[in-house]
């Protein structure tokens, strides 16, 4: 009889544990659909520190899935990270790369702007440099084994790397602007 009560108590306890596990699993399933916002404040603080230390930056531009422009920034001392941009943050980053002067942003780092559908931020930045008369250094097309065009823009406090799609439209644009591809 004592053994039977002990068995029943053990079964009840295991049923309660099973219910707790099921409850935890259902709680986990409800959290799967939530999306956290990117910590651009932390990215801004790190960029500011890097600029104040006078580091040379390696920068690549891109667009997030939500069509927000960003810079992928890294240096000799800091691993790469994403820094979402707006006009002011973009201009401050380019100013630092060209002149070596850090300028504080007045806008909220969490406020970003979306690009139009189908716009490639990296290509737009490259076009701004070309139309501004800046010199880019291209990898010869015969050395490219894929469907990309690679170029770099060396600056005083860093380098911008471009890898844009190799399309007839892009090639025509570069040739019209007398780029040495």
Image (cartoon, rainbow, N blue to C red):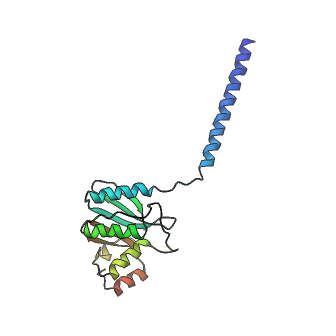
Q: Quadrant of the N terminus?
A: top right
Q: Is residue 154 left or right of residue 69?
A: left
Res 165 seen here: no
How many marks on residues? 0
Q: Is residue 37 left or right of residue 123?
A: right
Taking the spot 68% from the left edge, 30% from the top edge, the residue there is 16
- Between 133 and 51, the residue placed more toward the observer is 51
Q: Residue furthest top?
A: 1
Res 149 seen here: yes
- Between 28 and 42, the residue placed more toward the observer is 42
Q: Position of residue 48 (x, y in %)?
A: 33, 58
Classify 25 as above or below 104.
Answer: above
Q: Position of residue 150 (x, y in %)?
A: 34, 72
Taking the spot 69% from the left edge, 30% from the top edge, the residue there is 15
Q: Quadrant of residue 129?
A: bottom left
Q: Residue furthest right?
A: 1
Q: Residue furthest front?
A: 106
Q: Position of residue 117 (x, y in %)?
A: 52, 74
Q: Quadrant of the C terminus?
A: bottom left
Q: Quadrant of residue 158?
A: bottom left
Q: Residue furthest bottom?
A: 176
Taking the spot 70% from the left edge, 19% from the top edge, the residue there is 7
- Between 42 and 71, the residue placed more toward the observer is 42
Taking the spot 47% from the left edge, 56% from the top edge, the residue there is 38
Q: Quadrant of residue 147?
A: bottom left
């Amino acid at each position: 009889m004592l053994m039977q009560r002990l068995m029943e108590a053990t079964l009840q306890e295991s049923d309660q544990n099973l219910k707790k596990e099921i409850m935890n699993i259902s709680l986990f399933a409800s959290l799967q659909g939530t999306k956290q916002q990117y910590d651009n404040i932390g990215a801004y603080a790190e960029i500011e520190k890097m600029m104040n230390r006078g580091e040379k930056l390696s920068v690549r531009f891109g667009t997030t899935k939500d069509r927000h422009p960003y810079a992928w920034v890294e240096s000799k001392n800091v691993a790469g990270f994403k820094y979402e941009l707006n006009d002011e943050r973009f201009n401050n980053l380019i100013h630092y790369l060209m002149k070596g002067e850090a300028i504080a942003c007045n806008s909220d780092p969490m406020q970003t702007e979306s690009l139009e559908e189908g716009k490639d931020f990296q290509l737009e930045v490259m076009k701004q440099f070309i139309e501004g008369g800046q010199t880019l250094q291209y990898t010869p097309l015969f050395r490219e084994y894929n469907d990309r065009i690679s170029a770099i823009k060396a600056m005083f406090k860093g380098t911008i790397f471009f890898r844009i799609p190799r399309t007839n439209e892009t090639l025509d644009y570069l040739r019209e602007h007398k780029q040495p591809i």
